Amino acid sequence: MLGIGNYLWRLIPANPILLRVITAGGKRKRDLIIRCAYLGVLLLLVIFLLLGSASSLANASLAQLSMQSAEIFWWMSYVQLGLVALLAPVFTASAITQEKDSQTYDILLTTPLTNGQIVLGSLLSRLFFVIALLISGIPIFSITQMFGGVAIRDIVLSFLIAASTAFVTGALAMAVAVFKVGTRRTIFSFYLWIILFLAIPLILENMGYFQHRWLFTGTGKVASHISWFAGVHPFLALRVIFGDPAYQPPELAMVQKYPWPINWYLSSPHTFYITFTFVFSFVLVIPSIVALRRLAQSSRTLQQWFLQLIHLSTGDSTRKPRRVWTNPIAWREAKTKASATRAVALRYGFMVLGIAGAIVLLVLSSTLETPSQVIGANGYDPAKGTVLIVTDGQPQPYRLRLFGSSTTPATVIKLGDQPVGPEELREGRFIDEFLPDTTGGVRAVHTIRVSEPRSVLGDRLTRQFLLGAIMVELAVILLILTQSAASAVTREKEDGTLDLLLSSPITSHYYIWGKLRGLISFVLPLIAVPVVSILLFVIHDTFAASLVPGVSRPWTVFPEAVLVLPATLVMVVAFAAILGMQMSLRCRKTVMAVMSSVGIVAGICGALWACGSGAAASNDFGQPGLVIGSFSPFTLMALLINPADIANKSFGNPNASVADSRILIFFFGWIAAAAYGLIVWGMYKSMVRNFDMTIRKQAT
């Protein structure tokens, strides 16, 4: 152990890569801005939470003050972990690719530096900045100690979870860069996988899946539960240390039947996560150290080597001739991005998963439940005054008492929660509540409550899942398109091909229009996924209504969504593309262009969602709120797919005119699409006009 410690101690101070990045990091304006922004976010969060509870804490007891302090600690821990998960890949993923971009990577490999010094120096120098951010936040976290309620041990554990998350994401990003799994653009695909890894377990936890539950001894009641993912997911591991009674791991004695380390994983997922991520980071770094120079000297990528190993590729680089469009720049952006094996797999995988998910959702929403009791054939028989009740497949007639007396009260009949007459006891309706009455030896009904046949999933859950799936699909499309657009120009600056293009007869109008057209053509098949998903539900509802005449079936998705959403989605992705191209033109490096573009697009979409959903849900706005919401793409999707949840006053109120609201959304949805088109056109003209001047300024 002492030998390893002495080696690391000699390695770090004497490593020029580590010292170069650390000393330069304190001088760069960008790093200072990030530090200030990080601390500003934490400080504003504390101020916001304190001001929000100022009135309730004026005369609060010490117990209430400690509870408020614990809540502030929870929020700060979540925000800190989210910022670390966002920033760590930014600084570490560019460790090797930055050397390649500046043409210093080959020179670095010719120096006497060992593989370990290069890899560890690059990794630790980038993580130094993230760890410095964590340390700078300690004074703000100390505020939670003013009123108590937060143990120092919990603060230390939250910082260890954040630090271990930074190390494991940094080690993963370093492995991606060293093993040449992809180019600079792989960094942002790596971001996508991180987002999916963080989001999917949280969604499954909230839906009640993959939960480990245990019972109080002798009572059979659930004591608590914890997700099976808690030991490998940072946010779920962080939740364990908050002391939530409904989310606590079992005691070690309760899981002794499991072998080690499963019992450790279940009883203490937060310490398991910290230990596992640090060990896994070390395991990831070792192959990078061993294979660094060997991979750098090879012209084959890891993918090519694997395909040749299993005899699926001969290593030849020849390919069939392809027909080029009249605008070759547009063809290159649209076709070359989609022609790579990995891009084809991701593209068609996205489309297949999206359509398959919509089909599964449609099947679940159209498959009826199998109730234990249902109204039988012909329902209520007025001639006999009876209704046929089918219980577990066995039909039995029961008499209805339409008029009560002092000894035999009248039958209570309800449809849902509303009292109705016996004619509503129709064949096929589900029986939710049934109380028989055998007074006087007559088999009669005391209370019966029925409802319409329900699907396995239910209409409301179907709309919620469909809306969530389409929102995720749009977010993924915007992320893919934005990072592609943001690297469209910087990529050619870095590899030197932009100078060759500018020396040709290609004009700025031809170049920028080709880029924009190619990028939109690239994502059009992806845009078809949410549109086709909605179209499937519209077609199903249309045929379901025609096959059962006389029965009013509500639309799962308003049919006008098929007309409004395609135009809106195309204009939104065009806006994201032209914005990414603007940043790609102005920035010199791909990393800065992509991060700036993704941040701006995410901020604009978030602000539009907050304003649009707030206006649509407000009782003060009413139908004018629908007009405001139509200009937010995510709010517009919610209004077309699940309007009752977001605009209850306009769609959930029985006295509201749903037809008028639908006309407003349809009309102003098209106006919003036209407005986005005008914005894109204005940004395009500005980019064409300033293209030459911007390139000349960067050349000086």
Image (cartoon, rainbow, N blue to C red):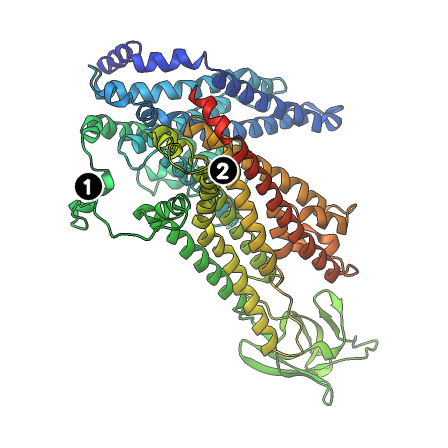
Question: Going 76% across and 24% down the picture, which residue do you hit?
Answer: 59
**Mark 1, other Cα within 10 Å: few <14 / some 14–19 / many ≥20:** some
Q: Position of residue 230 (x, y in %)?
A: 43, 38
**Mark 2, other Cα within 10 Å: few <14 / some 14–19 / many ≥20:** many
Q: CA distance from mark 2 to mark 1?
A: 46 Å
Residue 615 image label: none
On-image quarter of the C terminus: top left
User: From the viewer's perspective, is 576 left or right of 646?
Assistant: left
Q: Amino acid at mark 1?
A: Trp
Closer-to-camera residue (268/218): 268
- Name the outermost residue toward the bottom: 383
Question: Going 60% across and 27% down the picture, which residue do you hit?
Answer: 72
Secondary structure state at the residue bearing disc 1? helix
Q: Position of residue 673 (x, y in %)?
A: 62, 49
Q: Which residue is mark 1?
A: 305
- Residue 302 against residue 547 in the figure, above or below: above
Closer-to-camera residue (257/476): 476
Q: Position of residue 400 (x, y in %)?
A: 73, 80
User: From the viewer's perspective, is 156 left or right of 123?
Assistant: right
Closer-to-camera residue (121/687): 687
Residue 248 image label: 2
Question: Going 71% across and 49% down the picture, which residue do you hit?
Answer: 627
Question: Going 33% across and 42% down the picture, which residue do you hit?
Answer: 258
Secondary structure state at the residue bearing disc 2? loop
On-image quarter of the N terminus: top left
